């Protein structure tokens, strides 16, 4: 089945630094990937839709200059949290779909970001 | 945009009993409704889904019903087992190509042995 790999699984960084999270579709091509954020005991909140070869589409309230998304190839999307602050600490998770239609959405394993 | 509400937020049942989780959505254009199970610290896993042209779908102990008129859908788990304990999320999406999901707020299900 479709596999989505996400790295790193955990990262601790200092305030003011930037962190890059990678999301890879290992055995399929994904023209579209999605980035979600999840606070403890809360739901998955869609942050942005990552489109290969074009600009990402951000949800209302998500700062595009703070959460930079690059989808440079059909198998890789990256999310960079710039100038991170403690309130950015969260669980970030990506998803991708193999093929068309309704089926085949697979989530990455998520990245636990802690900003100190 | 789409707004998905989910109830209850927590649910405890005795092993062997049934569990029902309900969701409502706001956008009548939504036409695909998946349910995900997320165990602590792990990625969400799709457990069942339903399209808008179907009223009910069943897969062993799990079933989902959809009422398009009322814009609500429900997850039914029968003969619950301790391994069913997890957080369950409903979601709604529009369209087929490149569609994003809007998730409900989640239900923490505990099955008591």
Image (cartoon, coloured by chain):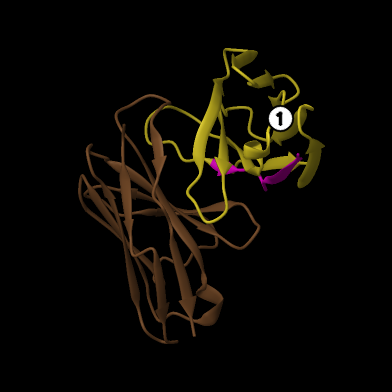
Chain colours: A brown, B yellow
Question: Chain for mark 1?
Answer: B
Whether the magenta-drawn stretch holds residue B105 is answered as yes
Whether the magenta-drawn stretch holds residue B37 is answered as no
Residue drawn 56% across the image and 77% down it: A87
Residue that numbered label 1 is attached to: B80
Q: Position of residue B44 (x, y in %)?
A: 51, 44
Residue drawn 38% across the image and 24% down it: A101
Q: Position of residue A35 (x, y in %)?
A: 42, 53
Instruction: Locate residue A93: give its quadrant.
Output: bottom left
Using residue A19 as the reference point, say whether residue B91 is left or right of it: right
Instruction: Locate residue A13: give its quadrant.
Output: bottom left
Q: SS class of the residue under badge 1?
A: loop
Q: Position of residue B51 (x, y in %)?
A: 54, 20
Say if residue B91 shows up in the picture: yes
Circle 1: is it few (<14), some (14-19), or many (20+) Cα within 10 Å? many
User: What residue range appears in magenta?
Assistant: B102-113
What type of secondary structure mainly makes up the magenta span?
strand
Of A42 and B10, nearer the camera is: B10
**On screen, A3 above or below B29?**
below
Instruction: Locate residue B28: give its quadrant.
Output: top right
Of A48 and B41, nearer the camera is: B41
Q: Position of residue B105 (x, y in %)?
A: 67, 48
**On screen, B78 above or below A74?**
above
Say if residue B32 shows up in the picture: no
Residue found at the very far left of the displayed protein: A73
């Amino acid at each position: 089945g479709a596999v989505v790999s996400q790295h790193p699984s955990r990262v601790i960084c200092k305030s003011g630094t930037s962190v890059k999270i990678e999301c890879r579709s290992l055995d399929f091509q994904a023209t579209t990937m999605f980035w979600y954020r999840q606070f403890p005991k809360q739901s998955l909140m869609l942050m942005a839709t990552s489109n290969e070869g074009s600009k990402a589409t951000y949800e209302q309230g998500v700062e595009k200059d703070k959460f930079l998304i690059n989808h440079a190839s059909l198998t890789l999307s990256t999310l960079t949290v710039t100038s991170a602050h403690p309130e950015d600490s969260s669980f970030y998770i990506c998803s991708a779909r193999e093929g068309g239609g309704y089926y085949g959405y697979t989530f990455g394993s998520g990245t636990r970001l802690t900003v100190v | 945009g789409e707004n998905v509400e989910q109830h209850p937020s927590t649910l405890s049942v005795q092993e062997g009993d049934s569990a029902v989780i309900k969701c409502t959505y706001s956008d009548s254009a939504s036409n695909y409704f998946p349910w995900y199970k997320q165990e602590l610290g792990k990625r969400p896993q799709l457990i069942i889904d339903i399209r808008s042209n179907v009223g009910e779908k069943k897969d062993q102990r799990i079933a989902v019903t959809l009422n398009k008129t009322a814009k609500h859908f429900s997850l039914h788990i029968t003969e619950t087992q301790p391994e069913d304990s997890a957080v369950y999320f409903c979601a709604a999406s529009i369209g087929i190509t490149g569609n994003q999901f809007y998730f409900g707020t989640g239900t923490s299900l505990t099955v008591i042995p």
